[in-house]
């Protein structure tokens, strides 16, 4: 049996802390230039400005939330460098733990198996690529957390909340709008659910438009700036390089939690895994067509891969027949081992 949920959370927390220690506090420069520095500038009035902020390619949702935490820390006079480091990474770690809980709840709701839910959570927690992201203020981390919350909203179902979370997934990282599109599919089955989903999505997009209006002087200015840079002018490929279409297949072979399949048995109908497979498949298919690719763009979907594998399984694989001394003694005819027929007699 997998460990308890509390043990899964503790393992996830330890893995994230170990990642912070081993990687010297930073996995990617976007942690600093897209989140920490803009948030610092909002609270203290100074900080570096990366080219994305000069070009208007980012919205202030993520940095604004981090700035609120920084402002609270400043009010409490907890504003040293290490304190702010703990604030930003601690907040993201807590969010990732809540998202891990949502993922396990989703597996249990789709399969009716608490053991499968805990096993999927354990595989995510011990996945080194995810552990490296789980405490990082990055769009990849924050957007997949929102997507996992959206998966849980599908189970209840709460279509307005699902729409709002899909919009939040998009706002936190624009390519994650592909995840949001996959999450929308169950809501489109009936007009009433589609209308409620559209309401939640509309509220989230209206908030994004208001943020851009205040920051850049026009609604959705950061969205259009991002699309111009990456698609219209193809600057991401020119400045940062291109990779072949099969790059994310290689990332899947290297990073996805395939070893967890060794602990699973059988396969149920794909319908149980469809809520996770739809956003996962759409995201990887479209992102494979984009020239500029990075491993971290794949790492964001590792929890979805684990959730899909768990939902596809019929249960956990039994222990091998040769695993225990009682079984070996029974095969030798040891009289201490009583057969079920003798017990019933």
Image (cartoon, rainbow, N blue to C red):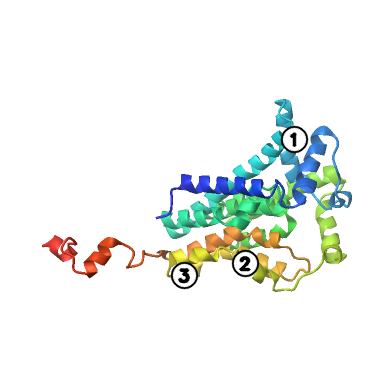
Decide which of 211, 119 is in the foreground and name it. Answer: 119
Q: CA distance from mark 2 to mark 1?
A: 35 Å
Percent coordinates x, y for residue 290 in the rendering = 76, 68
Q: Residue at the spot x=50%, y=69% of the render? A: 270
Percent coordinates x, y for residue 259 in the rendering = 52, 65
Residue 323 sits above or below residue 219 on the image: below
Q: CA distance from mark 3 to mark 1?
A: 51 Å
User: Quarter of the image holding residue 190?
Assistant: bottom right
Specify the quadrant that holds the C terminus: bottom left
Q: Residues within 10 Å of mark 3 (few under 14, many from 20)?
A: few
Tell me the residue that label 2 is attached to: 254
Tag 2–tag 1 contact (CB < 8 Å)? no
Tag 2–tag 3 contact (CB < 8 Å)? no
- Give the label on residue 269, or none: 3
Tell me the residue that label 1 is attached to: 81
First along the sequence among labels 2 and 1: 1
Helix, strand or loop under label 1: helix
């Amino acid at each position: 049996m997998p460990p308890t949920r509390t043990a899964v959370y503790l393992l996830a927390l330890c893995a994230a802390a170990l990642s912070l220690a081993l990687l010297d506090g930073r996995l990617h420069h976007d942690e600093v230039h897209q989140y920490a520095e803009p948030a610092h500038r909002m609270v203290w009035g100074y900080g570096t400005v990366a080219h994305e902020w000069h070009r208007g390619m980012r919205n202030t949702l993520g940095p604004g939330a981090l700035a609120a935490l920084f402002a609270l820390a400043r009010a409490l006079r907890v504003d040293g460098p290490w304190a702010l480091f703990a604030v930003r990474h601690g907040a993201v770690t807590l969010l990732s733990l809540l998202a891990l809980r949502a993922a396990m709840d989703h597996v249990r709701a789709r399969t009716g198996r608490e053991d499968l839910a805990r096993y999927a959570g354990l595989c995510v927690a011990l996945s080194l690529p995810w552990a490296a992201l789980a405490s990082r203020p990055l769009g990849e981390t924050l957007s997949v957390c929102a997507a996992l919350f959206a998966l849980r909203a599908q189970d209840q179902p709460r279509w307005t909340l699902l729409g709002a979370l899909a919009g939040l997934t998009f706002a936190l990282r624009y390519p994650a709008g592909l995840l949001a599109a996959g999450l929308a599919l169950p809501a489109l089955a009936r007009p009433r659910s589609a209308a409620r989903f559209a309401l939640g999505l509309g509220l989230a997009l209206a908030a994004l438009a208001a943020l851009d209006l205040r920051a850049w002087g026009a609604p959705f200015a950061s969205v259009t700036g991002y699309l111009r840079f990456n698609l219209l002018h193809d600057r991401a490929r020119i400045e940062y390089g291109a990779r072949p279409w099969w790059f994310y297949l290689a990332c899947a072979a290297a990073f996805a939690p395939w070893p967890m399949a060794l602990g699973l048995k059988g396969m149920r109908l794909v319908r149980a895994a469809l809520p996770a497979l739809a956003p996962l498949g759409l995201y990887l298919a479209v992102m494979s067509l984009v020239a500029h690719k990075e491993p971290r763009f794949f790492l964001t979907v590792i929890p979805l891969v684990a959730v899909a594998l768990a939902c596809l399984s019929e249960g956990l694989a039994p222990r091998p027949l040769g695993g225990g001394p009682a079984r070996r003694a029974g095969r030798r005819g040891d009289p201490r081992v009583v057969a079920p027929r003798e017990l019933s007699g």
